[in-house]
Image (cartoon, grey):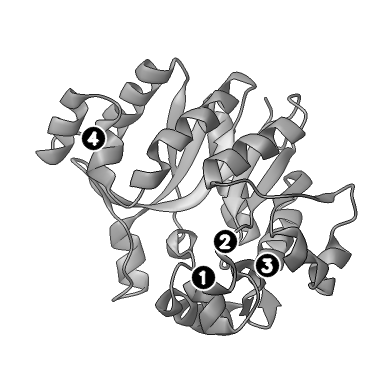
Amino acid sequence: MPAERLFNAIVLAADRGPADPVAAAAGVAAKCLTPVAGTPMVLRVVRALRQSGRAGIILLCGPAPEVLRDAPALRERIDGARVRWIAPQGSPSASAAAALADLPEDRPVLLTTCDHALLRPEMVRHFLDRSVAGGFDVAVGLAPHELVVRAHPGTRRTVLKFSDGRYCGCNLFAFLSPRGRAMAQRWGKVENQRKKPIRVIGLIGWTAMARYALGRLSLGEAMRRISAQTGLAAGAVTLPFAEAAIDVDSAADLELARAIAARVG
């Protein structure tokens, strides 16, 4: 598979409506419409995907129909061809599974989220090119925690603590083969534990959980155990971009994203 091969892309764009803390802080009907540097977050994500040169179809899973109806700028971007929309499901994993089922299996898929407001084209290219080069069925993007806190002191991120380093998630996932899409079905088993890394690691076996708790599980070993557990070639891609790890989950995150965007665009 050549590195320049196009990916279809899924953007998870559902939320808790006006009750979402980010939507409430921004005074908008849904989190995805929160403006950062004058542009709704979801449209910033769509722009980064298109400018990367790697995205074919971009499928938005959300926002809810009633939100979309009252969001003309977003509706205008949905042309039914390059940018499409489907209704969100009851959970992120169910939405991901529905979106994957809506896309043809002859092209790999990138999945990200609407709150990845600082996503840039070079992040997309780096992640996808290295995912392809790794020969994986499924891949996840991570950023070194040290890189993130050095660039943005004081930011609070969920940290995965491996024996060979600490990492932050980047809300970037690649499904590189038809069989790799099966990972979306397993996602539902861990999404409620995503803020508790030790429990997520524990789902790949008690030995792995114990080694993680003792600080003896490396990132590579974790990927090998996931591969053995799922029968899929799973891999992690390290990104050299601190902002790749900053999603907008809180009012403080929004303030930080807006400050960064004001400097770098």
Q: Nearer the viewer, mark 1 or mark 3?
A: 1
* Amino acid type of the residue that numbered disc 2 sits on in the rendered structure: Asp
Return the residue at label 1.
20
Residue in front for this viewpoint, 119 or 208? 208
Write the residue at 54% across / 46% down: 92
Q: Residues within 10 Å of mark 2 (few under 14, many from 20)?
A: many
Residue at image mark 2 = 15
Across and down, in percent, residue 130 comes to 54, 38
Query: In the figure, residue 204 lies in which quadrant?
Result: top left
**Count of marks, rendered view:** 4
Q: Is residue 91 above or below residue 65?
A: above
Secondary structure of the residue carrying numbered label 3:
helix
Judge by depth and name the residue closer to the eye, 202 or 127.
202
Check residue 44 in the rendering and tell me which mark sits there, or answer none.
3
Q: Position of residue 132 (x, y in %)?
A: 59, 31
User: Mark 3 or mark 1, which is nearer the start of the sequence?
Assistant: 1
Mark 3 vs mark 2, CA separation in Å: 17 Å
Distance from Cα at disc 4 to Cα at disc 2: 33 Å
Q: Earlier in the sequence, mark 3 or mark 2?
A: 2
